[in-house]
Image (spheres, helix red, strand yellow):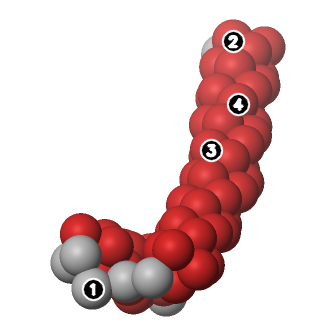
Amino acid sequence: MMFGMIHDVMSELIELRRRLLSAALTQGQMAELKSKIASKIDWGNKYADFYNCFFTYSYNFFISWLRFLADYIKLIG
């Protein structure tokens, strides 16, 4: 689901870049397009930070659980 959203945003960014590179824009349109591109990139960075925190937390939890199990096995073994 999330990867589909990222794919859609990346596709839109590619299209926005294509429009930006076509010299058929007024100054106002170019400024609006640059703002839209920056907004899409900010969105991507926000979610990248969220998922990075989520996976880091999950990994740390997993490692803690493994240590707990190892200690428990030593205790009963």
Image point (74%, 15%), residue name: 71
Badges 4 and 2: C-beta atoms under 8 Å apart? no
Instruction: Name the residue that disc number 3 marks.
Output: 52
Give the CA separation, mark 3 to mark 1: 39 Å
Instruction: Say which quarter of the image contains residue 69.
Output: top right
Instruction: Name the residue that disc number 1 marks.
Output: 24
Give the CA separation, mark 4 to mark 2: 21 Å
Q: Nearer the viewer, mark 3 or mark 4?
A: 3
Look at the numbered disc 1 and give the secondary structure of its residue.
loop
Instruction: Say which quarter of the image contains residue 43.
Output: bottom right
Q: Quadrant of the C terminus?
A: top right
Look at the numbered disc 3 and give the secondary structure of its residue.
helix
Instruction: Name the residue that disc number 2 marks.
Output: 74
Instruction: Name the residue that disc number 4 marks.
Output: 60
Instruction: Say which quarter of the image contains residue 19.
Output: bottom left
Can residue 73 be seen by looking at this rendering? no
